[in-house]
Image (cartoon, helix red, strand yellow):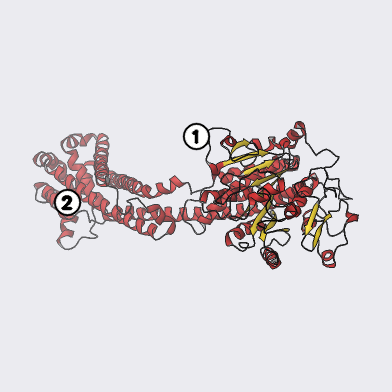
Amino acid sequence: MTAPDDVPQPPADGAAPDQAPDRASDQERDEALTPNRESAALVDALDALRARLAALRLPLATPGAAVARGDLAHAVDQLDDYLLPRLRAERAPLLVVVGGSTGAGKSTLVNSILGEHVTAPGVLRPTTRAPVLVHHPLDGRWFTTDRVLPGLARVQTGVDVTTSSAWGGTDGDRPPPTRTLRLVASEAIPQGLALLDAPDVDSVETANRELAGELLGAADLWLFVTTAARYADAVPWALLQTAAARRAQVALVLDRVDPGAEAVADDLRRMTAEHGLGDAPIFVIPEAAPAGPGALDEGLLPEPAVAEVSTWLSGLGGDPEARRRVITATRDGVVDDLVRRAVHLADAADAQEVADRRLREAAVRYHDDAVRAVESATSDGAILRGEVLARWQDFVGTSEFFRSVQKGVGRVRDAIGGFFRGRPAQAPQVEQAIASGLESVILDSAEAAAERTFEAWRGDAAGAALLEGLDLSRTSGGLRAEIGEQVRGWQGDVLALVREQGASKRGAARALSLGVNALGVSLMVIVFASTAGLTGAEIGIAGGTAVVGQKLLEAVFGDDAVRRLAAQAKQRLAARVSAVMSGQAARYTAQLDALGTADAGGAALRDAARRVEGAARNERATRAEPDDGGTRPWTGRLLRGAGTLRAPDRPESFPVPAERGERDEPAEDEEKRPGWWSRVFGRRGDDS
């Protein structure tokens, strides 16, 4: 492959240019950190999106949640490692990340195009445990801060990175190898260009694979290295498809190609086209001979072997406008990909809200059913069975008071004093029986609610994950004691109602002083009394004795007061039962409260994504188009091997033309389809 026609070319003789390198002063660099108005609006929109993404939680096991969590992490990494740093420093050097498969020869390639050992290749894998970033000495300020890849500790080194001194400290001070970025300043690389040797994308170590993906996501340009033996491996292509999806600028190096195996390069070109990377240039490096002209020279590939890559990178590094076009193309692709991710994440957040609401509704619904079950049991006469019925019958069923009531309500007042004085001990027994029966009803209803809620959650993927390690299939261990306190509290409420009512009745003061408990028990019986649910003799006994209690209260307080007291007593009981069931339901809903998924923020995230989309559209619409007329002067320096190319069918060295007019006439098929760089740079096969 020859260098693309529209990349500014280095001098034909390979000599250093007379013009000084393009060097930005400190003031220019500081100015570069301040974007124009449109870029500033885009940065603001991205900052707002970053805040929304940082607040997003996707803890529930909803469909697609696992994938969405990965997308969320990648989206935040895109913003932190590449997009925001790049927008805030548009003049920062072009970062070329050299990545690829295990043993593809990435480190050897980097060393060979620089002509010096800046990164250590080796036989043992993985070789590149800590990535190495090579930059021009005047570009050091761009990388010594956390402007880009803020999660990696910086270690500045000299060219020799094989000694302990390369770490700038003792072994005990070394940061974790896979979280360290080694910075190497070298005069061999053009200013405005930086090369980053990344770990293997298919490393046997998970941390290395993750770091490789992180570094590739921070690249302005991927230089992806593979071999003739492993170019079809699945893992590298998964990453390359990710690059295609976000329209990252990619070039491929096919390393270790044996003579006569040119079909491998053709097959690689076919695969790149099928995966949406048909515009990516492919450089072929032959297999190094064990001895002779094609052998390694002190660990470096021969200059002719790297001539194409070196010429291409030299031409790119020497032209600020060419670098800007590559950076802009990658940046725009990342913005579009980020908007797409954010919309999908908003959908995932909506799914979290739906699942949260579904689980909450199940817990609340079944415990509300429990409240209604208690209300039914305390109003249909079911409480007035068994022990309660027996104690109440003992209290009034055989007394002279009952016979007095039968003769007329007017005689009740005369019988009250003797009744209370004769049977005061019976009232507490009825009260205790009512408390015991009421506790059992409430506890049974709570147990049923817990069982139904547990089954509903267990049948829901989102709920089942929350149940792990928690004992939520039964009510809480202290519930019986809690119910007992609430029942006693309600009985106290009833007695308080009787006292309050008695305080407003002068004629009843003496009677109340003699029998508050008895009047209170009578009011409790009225609350529970109904013939529904009772059969046979129970109807006559319970119903009749309830009438006794009602007539007693009416004789003391009057009809209206009794109806009001009964309604208030029912309300207070319902409130206490609701409090118990709400507390039990909270055992489930608290799991959701801790996750914060009730308002996952899908709508707000979607709005933030739309804002980014609009700001990006405005920024692109106002972007100045460069002047493409003529050939721009090349202002950089040459990488090793640049300036001369050696092709298999042309064994002699031939100059790379410095001017468009000196270039050989293109073949017919080349005229039909513009090159990759032509499309990236906005040119269409001619100089128009």
When asked about the image quadrant of residue 256, the answer is bottom right
Who is closer to the viewer here, 250 or 596? 250
> Furthest-front residue in view?
292
Who is closer to the viewer here, 168 or 232? 168
Residue named by callout 1: 172
Image label count: 2
| Residue 688 showing in the rendered view | no
Left or right of residue 407, residue 154 in this image: right
Q: Nearer the viewer, mark 2 or mark 1?
A: 1
| Disc 2, SS | helix
Which quarter of the rendered picture does the N terminus lie within?
bottom right
Q: CA distance from mark 2 to mark 1?
A: 78 Å
Residue named by callout 2: 388
Tell me the residue at 59%/55% (across/down): 103
Mark 2 or mark 1, earlier in chain: 1
- Whether 30 is drawn above or below 529: the answer is above
